[in-house]
């Protein structure tokens, strides 16, 4: 088995103009081309390849541009409107390329200096200057043609340079496109089976692949057992050293349990590397006293370590939440496996957590490791993680399947300090501006599965853009 070949996000850029203007207004074409160069620099990133086709000013060039973008395998196109241009210089490009398009309606200055403009003394010069500022002019025409052609489009409106809103919007669109690109180049491993009777988490894996492009690979628990049995003492010892460095090991954790967790963690990392996985969902119960029970009761530390290493792992075979966790982690905000279980009506907060795994990179302080005498509702006993998500702004994400469609359910809130249940689980207190009661009712009304992913920071706008690029509905609770 091998990982999917790495691939950069490819962003297409073209500006539009009208060739009839160039002989009429000296310097206008070069001026507008220089504006396209400014946008090119705005799009450049170390991990992004920008394919710029310059200024497209005839339908014939537009047809070729569509072929060029398609050959370049771009993920998204930024259409920069420099001046008035006929829509036949736009439609062939986007129709042939067949990828999402973001229209940049950016004029060169925030406000035309009308006094200087009117003092030019030449109607021709004045018209040429006007054309250099009328980026907004063809937008209704382009919107009309795209809509009639069944092409979705997105817009960024503002000033070419020095506009923080424009720069933030472009950054959000690129980040959303990058996450979509990663999801389409990710293998999600599924190992074990669903938790018996937990109907809400049963997932249509074909639908997940269709929505995100994710490859789903079915893994055998026997393979994990075989890898674990073949580990050397040195490999287990190295992982044990790492566990002791990364976690706050509580005094009641035995060396036997720590070594058992280390052996399973080392095996998990080997399996993930062998299959080239970018995320995983698992669940298993097995039979008491068997090697498989020994493995499944010692996975939480290894799954937490994988999650913190860019390979999010969802328990209870929750494929949808593995997708949500991967999305959040790719945005760089974490993505910890959680569910809400109670509310504090006095403090107006929602209590959320799970018995692991946790995303230790977004923990408030160092994640504790505690022994559990019983895994509630599951088999056996073993070590678990106890952590709270960093205090401050957070975003909740659930990938929802309803009626043969995938959608994104999003809410922004705040992780707040306060007492938590110290039972060896992930646990946090979250406050939402609409209040705990309204949040829970609104979230339930969208009918998600009971798990969700928590990330740090407010990224609802980026998630909305990801949904727009992937053609997924986004439901925002708050």
Image: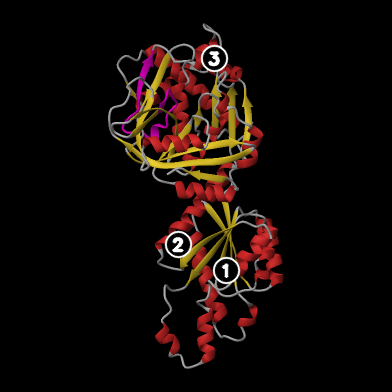
Near mark 1 (Cα within 10 A), the count class, few <14, some 14-19 or many ≥20, is some
Residue 147 picture location, percent across and down? 64, 60
Quarter that holds the N terminus: top right
Dot 2 or dot 3: first in sequence order is 2
Whether residue 5 appears in this view of the structure is no
Q: How many marks?
A: 3
What is the C-alpha distance between the residues marked 2 and 3? 51 Å
Rendered image: mark on residue 285: 3
What is the C-alpha distance between the residues marked 1 and 3? 58 Å
- Residue that badge 1 annotates: 139
Residue positioned most to the bottom: 121
Q: Residue at x 36, y 12 (%)?
A: 254
Dot 1 or dot 3: first in sequence order is 1
- In this view, the mark in front (1 or 3): 1
- Residue that badge 2 annotates: 166
As for residue 306 lying within the magenta part, the answer is: no
Q: Which residue is more in the foreground, 22 or 390?
A: 390
Contact between marks 2 and 3 (CB within 8 A): the answer is no
Dot 1 or dot 2: first in sequence order is 1
Q: Which residue is more in the foreground, 263 or 180?
A: 180
Magenta stretch: give its range: 353-372
């Amino acid at each position: 088995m091998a990982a999917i070949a790495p691939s950069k996000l490819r962003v297409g850029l073209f500006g539009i103009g009208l060739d009839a203007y160039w002989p009429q207004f000296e310097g206008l074409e070069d001026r507008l081309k220089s504006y396209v160069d400014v946008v090119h620099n705005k799009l450049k990133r170390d991990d992004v390849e920008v394919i710029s086709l310059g200024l497209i000013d005839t339908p014939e060039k537009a047809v070729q541009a569509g072929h060029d973008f398609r050959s370049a395998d771009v993920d998204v196109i930024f259409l920069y409107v420099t001046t008035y241009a006929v829509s036949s210089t736009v439609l062939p490009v986007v129709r042939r390329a067949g990828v999402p398009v973001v229209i940049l309606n950016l004029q060169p200055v925030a406000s035309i200096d009308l006094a200087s403009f009117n003092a030019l003394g030449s109607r021709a010069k004045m018209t040429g200057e006007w054309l250099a500022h009328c980026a907004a002019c063809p937008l209704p025409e382009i919107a009309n043609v795209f809509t009639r052609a069944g092409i979705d489009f997105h817009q960024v409106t503002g000033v070419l340079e020095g506009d923080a809103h424009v720069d933030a919007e472009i950054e959000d669109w690129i980040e959303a496109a990058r996450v979509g690109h990663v999801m389409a180049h990710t293998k999600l491993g599924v190992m074990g089976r669903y938790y018996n009777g937990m109907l809400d988490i049963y997932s249509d894996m074909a639908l997940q692949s269709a929505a995100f492009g994710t490859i789903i690979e079915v893994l055998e628990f026997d393979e994990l057992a075989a890898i674990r049995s073949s580990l050397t003492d040195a490999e287990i010892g190295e992982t044990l050293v790492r566990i002791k460095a990364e976690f706050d090991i509580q005094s009641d954790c035995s060396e036997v349990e720590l070594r058992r967790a280390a052996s399973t963690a080392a095996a998990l990392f080997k399996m993930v590397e062998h299959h080239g996985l970018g995320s995983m969902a698992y669940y298993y119960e097995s039979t008491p006293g068997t090697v498989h029970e020994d493995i499944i009761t010692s996975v939480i530390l290894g799954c937490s370590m994988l999650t913190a290493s860019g390979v999010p792992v969802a328990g209870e075979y929750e494929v949808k939440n593995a997708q949500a966790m991967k999305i959040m982690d790719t945005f760089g905000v974490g993505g910890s496996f959680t569910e809400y279980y109670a509310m504090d009506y006095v403090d107006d907060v929602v209590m959320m957590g799970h018995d692991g795994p946790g995303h230790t990179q977004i923990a408030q302080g160092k994640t504790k490791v505690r022994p559990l005498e019983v895994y509630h509702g599951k088999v056996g006993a073993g070590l678990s993680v106890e952590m709270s998500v960093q205090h401050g702004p957070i975003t909740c994400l659930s990938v929802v399947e309803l009626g043969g469609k995938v959608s994104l359910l999003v809410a922004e809130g705040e992780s707040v300090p306060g007492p938590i249940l110290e039972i060896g689980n992930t646990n946090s207190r979250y406050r939402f501006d609409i209040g705990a009661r309204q949040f829970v009712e609104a979230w339930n009304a969208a009918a998600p599965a009971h798990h969700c992913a928590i990330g740090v920071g407010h990224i609802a706008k980026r998630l909305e853009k990801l949904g727009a690029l992937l053609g997924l509905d986004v439901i925002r609770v708050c």
